[in-house]
Image: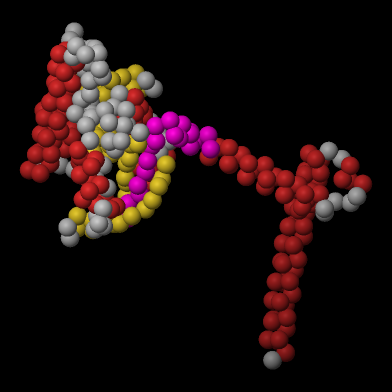
Amino acid sequence: MTIPRSLPVPSHPHVHLTGIREEDYDSFCQIYGGDSPRRKAYFQSLVKHSRDNWNQWNNSSNENTSGEPVFPKSWPFIAIRLVTSISDDGTVVGPFLGELSTYRWGYDFEKGTEQYDSLVKINEERLPGDSELIWMIGYSVSADYRRQGIASAAVDVLVEWLHAVMGSKVVVACCAVENIASAGLLARCNFTKVKEYQSSLGRMDYGGMLYWEHVKNGGGVDKRKIYRKNAEKKRRDALKICYERLNTLLPQKARRRPKTDIVELTTEYILELETEGAEKSKLIAELDFAIEKSKGALA
């Protein structure tokens, strides 16, 4: 089995998912708001994580003689990268656009409960390739490349990889309640919003969070199609109610005419009523003014 050095994003041929590299640090800092010792340490852990996971996967694949599937310890293609060229060995060259990470789900919303420690321990002890192992994803893209569908397309590739390669039944994600953009991305990627909870770490309160799930072959449901279908149904229902109400306003003979004529005539009638109402309101206002003026003259 040949282990790829990158994964293409089908809907964006100029974008690949690759390992994260030391030279990506400046671009990484621009996304996350500047340099700091903590950010540097986190970045270096991502570089090591990405490199070690790919090497382990590649070496295990080369040494594998059993024919059984070989799994990496975790997701190695952490960088979302714009492709400017591809070297002879398959290395993608290009600027760093964003991060796409995976973590073992830590049951954030179970903190403080009796089952919290056991749930976390069970998920930590599961081996890569175990269908019950629950992965959580994280993502971020440079502001210059947002609203182009890159992040959602990259998440689609990652989720498909976790289901197809790692065999995971469930992939999860979390976002802040007020993060409308992130929630929209997860909905577009066919995640299902499961619950809202309060997140905290020590004394730090992170506020309301939304917990989402993507179930392998379980949803297979495209939320965008559902939204469009529901919106179309609401539109048809509204038109039907509108037609029925408008139809009752017309004389009996007029009701034999086509619906388009009825709607057109009724719309004109409503506009006429509105105009008449406006004229009446104007007349009443003028009369009120005249009465007040007369009262003043009599006084």
Q: Position of residue 73 (x, y in %)?
A: 19, 29
> Who is closer to the viewer here, 31 or 175?
175
The reply, left or right, for residue 162 in relation to residue 187 is: left
Q: Is residue 35 above or below residue 294?
A: above
Quarter of the figure with the C terminus: bottom right
**Residue 283 in which image quadrant:** bottom right
Q: Position of residue 152 (x, y in %)?
A: 36, 32
**Residue placed at 87% from the left, 45% from the top?**
255
> Residue sitting at 72 percent across and 62 percent down?
278
Residue placed farthest to the front in the image?
66
Residue 80: percent from left, percent from top: 26, 27
Report the side of 216 relative to 271 (left or right): left
Quadrant in the rendering for residue 147: top left
| Magenta stretch: includes residue 212 | yes
- The percent position of residue 50, horizontal first and vertical second, equals 16, 28
In the image, what residue occupies the spot 42% across and 42% down?
192
Q: Nearer the viewer, residue 63 or 265?
A: 63
**Residue 268 in sight in this render:** no
Q: Which residues are magenta?
A: 208-226
Q: Residue at the bottom extreme?
A: 299
Q: Find the residue positioned furthest to the right.
A: 253
Camera-side residue of 33 and 178: 178
